[in-house]
Amino acid sequence: MRNIVLVGFMGTGKTTIATKLAVRLKMKYISTDNLIEKREKRTINEIFTDSGEEYFRGVESDVVREVSGMADSVIDAGGGVVLSEENMANLKSCGMVISLTADADTVVERTKKYKHRPLLNVEDPRRKIRDLMAKREPFYAKAEHVIDTGKLTVRQVVDRIAGLIEDKKDD
């Protein structure tokens, strides 16, 4: 089976949905952020702090190229992966790309307890979230499918994605 790639802003449920979906579909779960941390032997936060966002994005692109060569996987792609056309082309070449979305208030609520989000370690996280979401929305919209997770349960989102997979098999 081709890969299922979840993209979307932080706090939209990518990791939770991807892990549940992988179990349901009996596929492998892959997190690009986890692979980056393993490769770099440091956290995403440490990479941003010590080496900067540009360095991080380069490593992220290397990891995306690597996972694009895999199959039968649910790929949980980092929130900014869509900023690179090359990343999106690689991810689309290996599977179905689904963007998970949620409104800014939902994202704020879901991310407020996490201190490991380097882009939110600012004075006004709500404003930063709104600014980043506005900037990235056109990139997320390039996915094959978009699902708003804001008012759905994890199970409902997993069911929707599983339905998309079934529909694709019927084509």
Image (cartoon, helix red, strand yellow):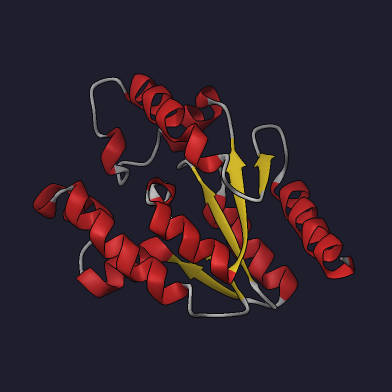
The number of numbered discs placed on residues in the rendered structure image is: 0
Q: On the rendered structure, is 115 left or right of 166?
A: left
- Residue at (64%, 33%) from the top-left corner? 150
Q: Nearer the viewer, residue 97 or 9?
A: 97
Q: Residue 43: horizontal and vertical position, in percent?
A: 25, 59
Q: Nearer the viewer, residue 92 or 127?
A: 92
Q: Is residue 74 visible?
A: no
Q: Nearer the viewer, residue 165 or 31?
A: 165
Q: Quadrant of residue 6?
A: bottom right
Kindly tell me whether residue 31 is visible in this rendering. yes
Instruction: Relative to 85, say whether 133 is above or below.
Output: above
Q: Quadrant of residue 12?
A: top right
Image coordinates for residue 103, horizontal then vertical, percent:
57, 27
Q: Residue at x 72, y 43 (%)?
A: 153
Residue 18 place in picture, x, y as percent:
60, 60
Instruction: Please name the residue shown 89% across and 67% down the image.
Output: 170
Q: Position of residue 115 (x, y in %)?
A: 30, 41
| Left or right of residue 140, residue 56 in this image | left
Residue with the most extreme left position? 50
